[in-house]
Image (spheres, grey):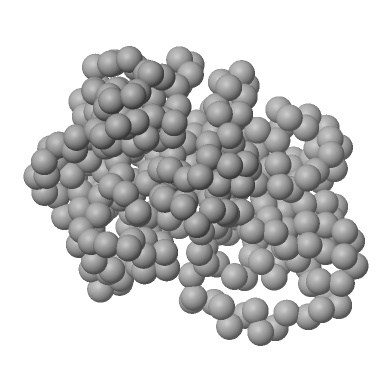
């Protein structure tokens, strides 16, 4: 099978093509596993964290990719949930303990990091961590739902807002454009303010129903009760803490933060950023229950999913453009021909 493989840690500044297209043997499902013929795989910022060593894979070579949509090609012994040909998706969680807090478990394994992922024609995953894809979505539309959408849903739940309160979103890429629509559906009276450095992202946010959109450092019309940050940088953290209202909560939806502007955190001022019972909460991974709850809601809305499609062999280009930060929606690799 064709696969884009990461051979080791690589900095994009030194190597703009860290993934190599190779031929690999087709994986074989073991007990409890399903073999999926991959149709598409989304491109996530976490792949950059893997490649550049902020959340490194435990072994190389590895096939990245964790927003997978495809069809069940075969099942190992003991599998009962799916039949051959069923359309399924796979997210960041490849396997874990199965407990309510399995996202925090030491047994958590990530798709595309701890186990081979979806930048390939076939992938194997435990059947308990594969999910039926609602018919309303095309393969390309469904792919970002498996991480950007699912982890975005978890972020919104952790924000703990009530209908009518003010929600802020910092960064407006693959996750932000889905969380905005989700928030408008679940909390229709909540004003949603979007902070983004890119004029393209701000315009897109207003197009999707944001009540206000401004630069990362801009002052919104009202102080938010909660802000969800999906950026890889530290400056937005300080900006968000400063404009939260008393008792507000900042949710940081990122696996890792990049080090480029970390020194800015030395300027944190207790009286401006943390006093008045402001909270900071991180999002750690995603659970099976998150995805099982989120996908039917996404279909009921239905979410408008904006995607840009690339060929599998163009994965390096897609990742490079993602890293540059000019986004409108999500990026998706077409792995197998449609049909």
Q: Is residue 195 visible?
A: no
Which residue sits at x=67%, y=52%? 228
Which residue sits at x=77%, y=32%? 187
Quadrant for residue 99, please give it.
top right
Q: How many marks?
A: 0
Quadrant for residue 100, please give it.
top right
Q: Is residue 50 visible?
A: yes
Q: Which sits in the foreground, 326 or 226?
A: 226
Q: Position of residue 126 (x, y in %)?
A: 37, 35
Quadrant for residue 89, please give it.
top left
Q: Judge from the rendering whether residue 241 lies leftward or rightward of residue 127; answer left or right.
A: right
Q: Judge from the rendering whether residue 11 lies leftward or rightward of residue 244; answer left or right.
A: left
Q: Position of residue 146 (x, y in %)?
A: 47, 36
Image vertical order of residue 302 relative to residue 43, above or below? above
Q: Position of residue 244 (x, y in %)?
A: 81, 60
Image vertical order of residue 257 relative to residue 251, above or below? below
Which residue sits at x=72%, y=53%? 227
Q: Position of residue 204 (x, y in %)?
A: 57, 41
Which residue sits at x=81%, y=71%? 274
């Amino acid at each position: 099978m064709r696969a884009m493989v990461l051979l080791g840690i690589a900095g994009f500044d030194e190597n703009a093509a860290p993934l190599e297209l190779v031929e690999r043997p087709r994986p074989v499902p073991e007990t409890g596993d399903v073999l999926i013929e991959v149709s598409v795989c989304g491109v996530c910022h976490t792949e950059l964290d893997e490649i550049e060593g902020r959340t490194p894979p435990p072994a190389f070579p590895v096939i990245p990719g964790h927003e997978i949509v495809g069809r069940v090609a075969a099942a190992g012994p003991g599998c009962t949930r799916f039949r051959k040909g069923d359309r399924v998706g796979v997210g960041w969680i490849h396997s874990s303990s199965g407990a309510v807090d399995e996202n925090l478990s030491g047994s958590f394994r990530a798709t595309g990091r701890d186990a081979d992922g979806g930048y390939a024609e076939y992938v194997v995953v435990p059947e308990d961590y594969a999910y039926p894809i609602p018919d309303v979505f095309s393969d390309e539309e469904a792919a970002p739902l498996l991480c950007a959408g699912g982890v975005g849903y978890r972020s919104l739940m952790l924000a703990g807002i009530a209908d009518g309160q003010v929600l802020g979103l910092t960064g407006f890429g693959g996750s932000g454009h889905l969380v905005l629509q989700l928030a408008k559906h679940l909390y229709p009276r909540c004003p949603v303010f979007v902070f983004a450095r890119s004029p393209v992202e701000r315009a897109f946010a207003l197009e999707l129903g944001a009540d206000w959109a401004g630069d990362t450092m801009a002052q919104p019309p009202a102080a938010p009760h909660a802000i969800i940050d999906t950026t890889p940088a530290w400056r937005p953290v300080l900006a968000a803490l400063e404009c939260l209202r008393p008792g507000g909560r900042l949710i940081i939806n990122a696996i890792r933060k990049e080090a480029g502007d970390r020194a800015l955190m030395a300027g944190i001022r207790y009286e401006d950023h943390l006093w008045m019972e402001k909270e900071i909460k991180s999002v750690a991974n995603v659970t099976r229950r998150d995805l099982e709850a989120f996908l039917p809601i996404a279909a009921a809305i239905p979410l408008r999913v904006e995607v840009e499609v690339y060929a599998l062999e163009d994965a390096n280009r897609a990742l490079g453009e993602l890293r540059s930060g000019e986004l409108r929606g999500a990026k998706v690799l077409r792995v197998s021909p449609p049909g």
